Amino acid sequence: MIRLSTKFERPDPGLVRQLGEFSAATVHEAQGRLGALDSTIKPVDHRMKLCGPAFTVVCAPRDNLMLQTAIHYARPGDVVVVSGGAYAEAGSFGDVLANACRAKGLGGLVTDTGVRDTEDLRPLGFPVFSRSVCIKGTVKETVGPLCEPVAVGGQTVRSGDVVNADADGAVVVRREDLPEVIAASRRRVDTEEEFIAAYRSGKTVAEICGLMPILAAKGVVIDAE
């Protein structure tokens, strides 16, 4: 007998919503440039965004048995995060499963393997982030873990951690770090808005970013026009 569990602690939905107000890049920078998934994992449509608690699953390459199982057990708002061995040559998810996810109110899919049916996925609007787009089909043979820590895109993702993703990529935030990362993201956005206002007022990049002392310390002399 193989016993699997889908029990894990989900984060406060209010904190998830607050984190979703920020871009993936902002969150990554705000938490000390940590948590970014590999840049190969991108949305099938640049307009897609997601932010929600991870529901993790491990799939064997070219096998989506456990992915379908995860979709069945995931709750509304959950983001199904698939560790599929970073295998690009398989389309383990398409428009049919996307419709199943949307009907359940799931928050999105992040996978280190491939997806297909992108022409149908784009207008459907269900957020799908994948390593590749591939037409090759899969089987349903291999049992794997549910809701255990997984390796995806160079990061360890636990069920209940929060994944934030947009056109630039995806970042994961540990559930217990959410309040701190939200506060840091707000501070970063405020600082960037101050920079933009200063540029618009006529100040230069060198003034705002303190470039000249940095260049001088590195022995740089610039003969400007």
Image (spheres, rainbow, N blue to C red):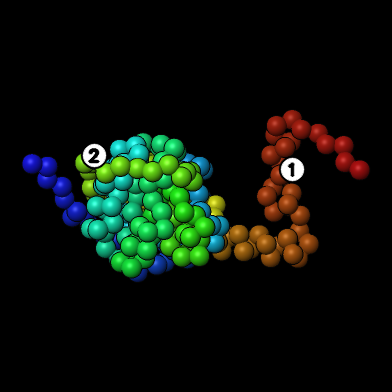
Residue 100 visible to the viewer: yes
Residue matched to label 1: 212
Judging depth in this view, the residue of 181 and 71 nearest the camera is 71
Quadrant of the image for the C terminus?
top right
Residue at x 58%, y 60% (from the top left corner) = 191
The spot of residue 222 in percent (x, y) is 83, 36
The spot of residue 100 in percent (x, y) is 33, 62
What's the mark number on residue 142?
2
Q: Is residue 192 left or right of residue 117?
A: right
Q: Amino acid at mark 2?
A: Thr
The spot of residue 213 in percent (x, y) is 71, 41
What is the C-alpha distance between the residues marked 2 and 1? 59 Å
For label 2, count other residues whose C-alpha is less than 10 Å away and answer few (under 14), some (14-19) or many (20+). Answer: some
The spot of residue 138 in percent (x, y) is 35, 42
Where disc 1 sits, the SS reads helix
The total of numbered circles placed on residues is 2
Foreground mark, 2 or 1, reads 2
Q: Is residue 114 left or right of residue 78?
A: right
Judging depth in this view, the residue of 118 and 13 nearest the camera is 118
Where disc 2 sits, the SS reads loop
Q: Amino acid at mark 1?
A: Met
Residue 171 visible to the viewer: no
For label 1, count other residues whose C-alpha is less than 10 Å away and answer few (under 14), some (14-19) or many (20+). Answer: some
Residue at x 28%, y 56% (from the top left corner) = 71
Residue at x 51%, y 43% (from the top left corner) = 39
Residue at x 21%, y 41% (from the top left corner) = 143
Residue 75: quarter of image: bottom left
